Amino acid sequence: MALLWPCILVAATGILAIDTPHPRNSTLHHLTQHLLEQYHKEVRPVHNWHDATTVYLDLFVQAVLDVDIQNQKLKTSVWYREVWDDEFLSWNSSMFDEIREISLPLSAIWAPDIIINEFVDIERSPDIPYVYVTSSGSIKNFKPIQVVSACSLQTYAFPFDIQNCSLTFNSILHTVEDVDLGFLRNREDIKHDKKPFLNDSEWELLSVSSTYSIRQSNTGDFAQIQFNVVIRRCPLAYVVNLLIPSIFLMLVDLGSFYLPPNCRARIVFKTSVLVGYTVFRVNMSNEVPRSSGSASLIGVFFTVCMAFLVLSLSKSILLVRFLHDEWRSGQELPLLCLQGDAGTDGSRMDPRTQDARVTESPVCQEHQIQSETLKEVWFQIRSINNYLQTQDQVDQQEVEWLALLYRFDQLLFRSYLVMLGLYAVTLCSLWALWSGL
């Protein structure tokens, strides 16, 4: 009985081994071995080397991850698809249990050397090591890519700016005689397909137009396909946080022109507005994109507004300073006149005249005293007249300066209104163009 148990165990093991299928005996394994056994991935997969391998491309834009205007770079997440025919990887599906599609390692087969010309950073994409191969020899290579590409970004119309960036695909080594390119879908379908795009970001996808061309160079002619990704900024947050507060600040500055030019409170008011402008510009500098090639319209406008404000403030300071100097000179004139009259009276009375008065008769002395009194009154009247004439001249100069500064103030006010109107019309036009796309 003890010898019977080992025999039973051996028999059961053999039965299980017969019933359990081995991977090497599967049809899929035989098909894979049949395809790759004598396959050479170093050779372009055509029987006739005169025939070109056509690679069909497709592109879906999923999201705009970053728009770096300062460095002129665009970071997008795209779903990239390429399909080509491999004449060495086809089979008769009826001979392999009707298997019409299998997955093979991408590293084991020939793949086209398609690159993006605008790449400026390392390609970031999940590692997908397999591709689908159909029984007709068609190979499908689908993968998501994070593309960091160079793009000419403009900020003039911020925050209603529209950016157009291109992604150009071509073979890096094979000319159009070896590797040609084509579209996997209709070009109109590619242009207007926005379903994969995520609209929860700052940017909105408008279109993805595509063109086919042949680039000529010294090494040969290369086929290339260019996808033009057109995006526009969603301006609502910038309108609420930038444009509306800026309009209120401009209206306050505009109201300061209704204060009298010679009012000292106007200087204090405009200084406060200037501080508000400065604080707003500091906060705005973090929101407005900066570019060395172009300046935004809103930044240029605020610079001009600050220039008008500083000019008006300087004019008010000079006016108050001038009026203060004129007032001080006008206050000193009466004192100088009275001091001059007192000195004149003292110079008219010499000692010999006073000694001669003692020897004269009382009647002559009385007439002489009346004559000197009349002369003194006459000199006082002349001093008052001179003072009044000088004061009239000062007042006349003050009126002339005030009239000149009033006209200059009106010129600044009208210039401010014209600039504000042009700015408003430009922003409304940009908004209308933005909404019409």
Image (cartoon, helix red, strand yellow):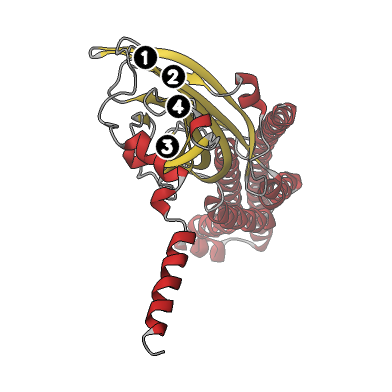
Q: Which of marks 4 and 3 is nearer the N terminus?
A: 4
Q: Which of 72 and 9 is in front in this view?
A: 9
Residue at x 30% of width, y 36% of height: 37
Q: Nearer the viewer, residue 23 or 316?
A: 23
Q: Which amino acid does label 4 sit on?
A: Gly
Residue hosting label 2: 181
Q: Are marks 3 and 1 in contact (CB under 8 Å)?
A: no
Residue hosting label 1: 52
Q: Are marks 2 and 4 in contact (CB under 8 Å)?
A: no
Q: Do the residues labelled 4 and 3 touch (CB within 8 Å)?
A: no
Residue 279, position as x, y percentages in the image: 57, 58
Residue 381, position as x, y percentages in the image: 69, 49
Q: Which of marks 3 and 2 is nearer the N terminus?
A: 3
Neighbour tally class for label 4: few under 14, some 14-19, many 20 plus, Cα within 10 Å: some
Residue at x 43% of width, y 47% of height: 128
The label shown at residue 137 is: 4
Q: Are marks 4 and 1 in contact (CB under 8 Å)?
A: no
Neighbour tally class for label 1: few under 14, some 14-19, many 20 plus, Cα within 10 Å: some
The label shown at residue 149 is: 3
Q: In this view, does 165 lie to the left or right of 297?
A: left
Secondary structure of the residue carrying tag 4 is loop
Q: In the rendered image, is residue 328 in sight?
A: no
Q: Which amino acid does label 3 sit on?
A: Ser
Q: Which of marks 2 and 4 is nearer the N terminus?
A: 4
Secondary structure of the residue carrying tag 1 is loop
Q: Which of 413 and 339 is in front in this view?
A: 413
